[in-house]
Image (cartoon, coloured by chain):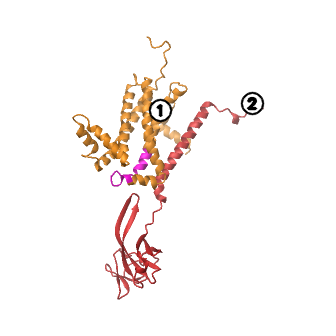
Chain colours: A red, B orange
Amino acid sequence: METSRPEAEAPISRRSFLEWAVFSLGGLIAAVLGGSGLGYFISPAFRKREEDWVDVGRAKDFPQGMPSKVEFVERRRDAWVTTERRSSAWVLTSNGRDFIIYDPRCTHLGCPFRWDQDKKQFLCPCHTAVFGVDGRVVSGPPPRPLDRYQSKVAGERLLILPKPVREKA
Amino acid sequence: MSLKAAGEWLRERTGLDRVWEALFERHVPEAKGPVAWLYTLGSASLFVFLVQFATGCLLAMNYVPSPDHAYDSVKFIGEQVLFGRLIRGLHHWGATFMVVLVGLHMLRVFFMGAYKYPREATWIVGVGLFLLVMGFSFTGYLLPWDQKAFWATAVGTNIAGQAPVVGSSLSKVLLGSEEMGPATLTRFYALHVLVLPALTGLFILLHLFLVVWHGISETPERRRGGPQE
């Protein structure tokens, strides 16, 4: 037992040890560099977009029981570029606390629609679409009700997130 | 198909095993102790170059060579991109390291007399590579477009402007304009990511071919009897 050792106990030569050391260290370096590089490359897939809430005014100032159009400046940050553009939305509230915000574009082909106070309906001039005050399609070609924006009241102010959310048809 | 069969298929059609042998199983002079480490400087430079290439490709994905956006895009890399700080840090420190390694490599070859016959061509190509590294340093330094970058390049191009006769033309060629601005940034960027890497790749191939072709020179021996004879 002392003299003949099984092959599993074969002595490690200097050469094989160095080979092992070079390949493992090299592998480690490659894994760290390759891993972080890959992470950098694919990071857009799971980067969260910042939510750009826009302050559109005092919640109490909006007319109650009838839609009103609010104009605001939308500031969007995308990567290293910040762009500003004028935008608008329809604000509907019955009590100054609960709000429904409509995307101002018709769900048919994106035309801006208007509120007709006599008919109590939203009318789109492009293809004679008609929406009810609740956003549902009354007549015309639109495939779904008006898109909405998320909103919240923080303190006295009404904040909206100008990103269309689809209503189920 | 097993891995071995695939390897055999490739070997038969490319002779890759011969390339492997020529590169990694060639004879190198025996050197012991600290001196042996001096022979690693060339490989180290090559490795850092590869790291610079990989990290540079990644940085270019988020960098804009325009005075409007250069600074903000670099900031974006550092603050918003996953591992962005690490990748930029590697490129930043790799650049410094590259100059140090290439300089030491050059000193090693010079003081050991390894540039002598028949290896003069290797030395000449190596000097070309050294100048290319200087070019990388000069053009890359401007790209972050911060105060340090701006004024360092202002000094650099003013030095070029001091040259007799051709000075002012030379500085205009470097700047791409009368003064430093958008045209300078795009010019430096194009040199840094297109022209210099292509030339460096070519020169590295030449340099490596010559190194393998001639083999590595022996470590010079200290003469026993002093400097006479």
Q: Residue furthest left?
A: B165
> Could you say where residue B173 lies in the image, as x and y percent from the top left?
26, 42
Chain on which label 1 sits: B
Residue linked to disc 1: B41
Residue A4: mark: 2
Q: Residue A17, position in %: x, y?
A: 61, 34
Q: Amino acid at mark 2?
A: Ser
Give the Cα separation between the discs numbered 2 and 1: 45 Å
Q: Secondary structure at mark 2?
A: loop
- The 10 Å Cα crowd at callout 2, few under 14, some 14 to 19, many 20 or more, is few
Mark 1 crowdedness (10 Å alpha carbons): few <14, some 14-19, many ≥20: some
Q: Residue furthest bottom?
A: A118
**A73 or A22, which is in the foreground?**
A73
Seen in the picture, residue B115 relative to A138 is either above or below; the reply is above
Membership of B59 in magenta stretch? yes
Nearer the observer, disc 2 or disc 1? 1
Q: Amino acid at mark 1?
A: Leu
Mark 1 element type:
helix
Taking the spot 43% from the left edge, 43% from the top edge, the residue there is B52
Considering every residue shown, the one lying at the far front of the view is A156
Is residue A24 placed above or below A113 in the rendered structure?
A: above
Quarter of the rendering containing residue B209: top left
* Span of residues in magenta: B53-71
Q: Kindly check if marks 2 and 1 are in contact, taking CB atoms under 8 A apart as contact.
A: no
* Percent of width and height locating residue B16: 48, 36
Q: As drawn, is B3 to the left or to the right of A77?
A: right
Location of the C terminus of chain B by quadrant is top left
